[in-house]
Amino acid sequence: MSRDRGKPGWKTLPIAAFIPKPGTSMQYKTGDWRAFRPVIDEKKCVNCLTCWIFCPDTAIKRKEKTVEINYDYCKGCGICATECPVKAITMVEETKK
Amino acid sequence: MKARMGFTGDEAFAYAAKQSMVDVVSAYPITPQTIMVELFSEYVANGEVHTNFVCVESEHSALSACVGASLTGARVLTATSSQGLALMHEIMYIASGLRCPIVMGVANRALSAPLNIHGDQSDMMGSRDCGWAQIYCENAQEAYDWTLQAFKIAENPNVLLPVTVNLDGFILSHAMEGVEVMTDQEAKMYLPGRKVEGMIDPSKPGAVGPLVMPDYYFEFKRQQEEAIRHVPATLQAVTQEYAKLTGRKYGIVDEYETRDADVIIVALGSTAGTIRSVAKGLRKKGKKVGLLKLWLYRPFPTKEAAEAIAKSKVVVVFDRALSPGAPYGALCQDVVSTAYAHKIKPAIVDAVYGLGGRDISPAEIESIYEEALTAAKTGTVKEQVKFVGVRE
């Protein structure tokens, strides 16, 4: 695959896929898995933090009056939109603006 | 001082394990492997070894515990049979993929169904492609000797792969033989404790066993292939050192009269002993027969096998496992590929035998040799695949 050109080969990689540095999962941005994007209507949001508790990827951050979604890691599962008691979150298809 | 002990194959394995400075053992009992770990647990209970014996609820957990322990840099041993090996199957790939030099004793036994506890090699052949090196023993002495040597092969920095030491269920696991052993001191000198930095080290945090996507997975599998290709050279160095110490010489293959043989039987494990005895008798009658016994089955010793069968006219491969629907049994497939790759053209016959512990007699082996000698003369093989001793 041409996009893998320049990546290290088997002779230089650490054996057994060992990653010798901790905390590297932060570098793996899973946001591009997303097909639907959660969008928050701040006017409806009551900042109850239900979505913050339910998000399985801890991709929701607390803010003073509402919450913010970290699109670098949000995979678009839609649990937040389903659980929101005031329907402040809608799932918008990524291909549609 | 050479000491000679009366050991079954299982006991010989346990005794070698006792002398191997093993840090962790985790295993689950299953016939006919049971005595391996039962006897070892006695050594632990008596304070004869300082091994951490981890009791678990299944073979899946046993091998999982072994993987975790091995990653810390510990010397680790386990043992199983048949259904237990099948239950370990998933973790076997993880042990080799994470490059854990675990040594596992396998008392080879048939797989269910129908339920059968007796010896054949279907269990290990089913886990053939798990990335483990595989050694097959002919007798209890070999079980003892290979267990000590297996650690040296597994732990070699160029290898770092798990190794199975296979012994035929009941025929070897439960039959008592005289076994020459080293003193504990000699064994300790040959095989000191494992002192390496493990992948898991609290002072050096990192990630073991992460998710690897299509852009990297293949590279790690290529590394593993390279590692297993280092086994034959490592094994030869290890066996040479062992021979100097004990006088017992091992290697990749064990040949008997192959040099000028018209007919060669290829076999693994205890049956090789019976075949050799039959071949000896036939040689006395002037018949040109030989035996190629493979000590090392994975990685497959292509070069050595090709050299051994190069001049023969008929090769009969003894498969103590069925590979349903395949052109031949597993061992025979390897021999056929070897012959093809080296452009040597003996007629090759597959003799599937001994399933579920069915005995094979010297008379049956002799008639197989005789039939092959006739085929060598006439140039026609009657049956490409034979099922030895099965009732029609």
Image (cartoon, rainbow, N blue to C red):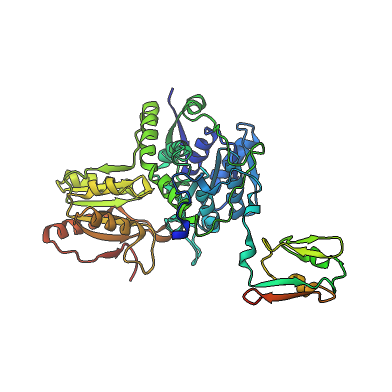
Q: Is residue A88 above or below residue B241?
A: below
Viewer-nearest residue: B287 or B96 = B96
| Residue B373 picture location, percent across and down | 17, 56
Of all residues shown, which one is farthest toward the front? Answer: A97
Task: Please state if B358 lies on the left or on the right of B77 as rendered.
Answer: left
Q: Position of residue B244 (x, y in %)?
A: 36, 27
Of A97 and B173, the residue lying toward us: A97
Q: Residue at x 80, y 67 (%)?
A: A51
Q: Quadrant of the C terminus of chain B?
A: bottom left
The residue at the far top in this view is B1
Q: Quadrant of the N terminus of chain B?
A: top left
> Considering depth in this image, is B3 or B298 the residue closer to the camera?
B298
Question: Does residue B66 appear in the picture of this structure?
Answer: yes
Asked whether residue B28 appears in the rendered view, the answer is: no
Question: Along the line of sight, which residue is nearer the eye, B260 or A70?
Answer: A70
The vertical placement of A22 against B243, above or below, is below
The quarter of the picture where residue B387 lies is: bottom left
User: Residue B114: where, in percent of width, then height?
Assistant: 49, 67
> Where residue B242 appears, x then y in whole percent?
39, 31
